[in-house]
Image (cartoon, rainbow, N blue to C red):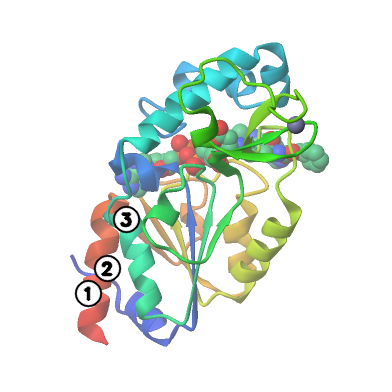
Amino acid sequence: MEFPKELIQKLKSARSVLFFTGAGISAESGIETFRGKGGLWNKMKPEELASFDGFMRNPNLVWEWYQYRRKIVRDTGPNPGHTTIAEFEKYIDDVTVVTQNVDNLHHRAGSTNILELHGNIERNFCMDCRTFYGIKDFLDVEEAPKCPKCGGMIRPDVVWFGEMLPQDIFAEAEGKAKMSDVCFIVGTSAVVYPAAYIPLSAKEGGSYLVEINIEPTEITNLVNCSLMGKSGEILPELINYFKGEI
Ligand code: BV8
Ligand code: ZN
């Protein structure tokens, strides 16, 4: 695969690179995306399953859905898209991953600087005493569990629709985006806010924007370079090409 000279030039001189990722980067690990063909939101209503009110209305249904997604994540692993991003840390001083994904696969791929905008399904917390619990504490628990300490309701540590993102993490992500030399936008439809402001902040900061997606998206007309295809195939090819050039 050929890559634009400008992209390789920008990468060779880059001190800081940011990877903004969405569900598409985990598709090749067998994790369904949300929109697009076979997407989760085609089968289930986000407001019912990924919202506080939905959880209050039917905690067992929502808990069951997260246990189902946790099993899928447990039975799979990172793909070459995730591992290549981790590998870039060997060649570029400052590599940051800003992800919308809650599947923990960037961690498992070995990336060391990850900002999770929407939380992580491998964590739970008590809504009353705020005690945190891992997934091992409730491995095969089918109904929404109560807190062993105070009896409060346990919920997944994810950001539901209508809920605020963790402000410190969002602010750090915006700062990193603004100062990045190159910003990759990988496997996201970029329609969920305020996460979708991150690539815009990178553009504002003068970063070179590269989109990797199997199809055009909301921001394709904003980027400097659009690489159409699967991230699990394009990213390994890109780093090999890059390594050949340095
Ligand atoms: C909030 C965690 C308010 C839970 C998630 C402004 C305008 C319009 C609407 C809003 C707005 N501001 C706020 C809103 C409302 C809402 C929103 O954005 N709605 C959208 C749908 C219009 N935002 C919120 O509710 C946010 N909170 O605003 O709070 C507030 C303010 C002040 C005070 C109090 C409250 C919270 C949003 C976070 C919701 N939580 N996840 C869970 O996962 O269970 S969002 C969830 O969906 C994901 O985290 C992700 O962010 C999003 C899915 O998007 P993608 O990851 O992009 O996935 P998608 O399937 O869409 O696309 C996949 C892409 O990959 C496709 O382009 C496909 O072509 C591509 N692809 C597929 N395979 C591959 C590939 N690419 C490469 N390789 C492949 N192999
Ligand atoms: Zn508690």
Residue 134 found in image quarter = top right
In percent of width and height, residue 192 lies at: 60, 41
What kind of residue is marked 3? Gly
Task: Determine the residue positioned at 59% across, 21% down.
Answer: 49
Q: Quadrant of ligand 2?
A: top right
Residue type, label 1: Tyr
Q: Residues within 10 Å of mark 3 (few under 14, many from 20)?
A: many
**Residue at image point 47% right, 28% down:** 139
Q: Is residue 31 visible?
A: no
Tag in front: 2 or 3: 3
User: Between residues 121 and 236, which one lies in front from this camera angle?
Assistant: 121
On the image, numbered disc 2 is attached to which residue?
Answer: 238
Q: Is 153 situated left or right of 38 in this image?
A: right
**Left or right: 98 in relation to 132:** left
Please report contact status of discs 2 and 3: CB closer than 8 Å, yes or no: no
Q: Is residue 131 above or below residue 13?
A: above
The quarter of the displayed image where residue 206 is located: bottom right
Task: Look at the picture and state if 107 lies above or below 90.
Answer: above
Q: Secondary structure at mark 3?
A: helix
The residue depicted at 39 percent of the width and 29 percent of the height is 71
Instruction: Say whether mark 3 is within 8 Å of ligand 1.
Output: yes
CB within 8 Å, label 1 to label 2? yes
Front residue of 175/199: it is: 175
Classify mark 2: helix, strand or loop. Answer: helix
Farthest-out residue, right:
128
Element class at badge 1: helix
Q: Please give the residue where the numbered disc 3 appears in the rendered image.
A: 81
Q: Which residue is mark 1?
A: 241
Does residue 128 sit above or below 182 in this rendering?
A: above
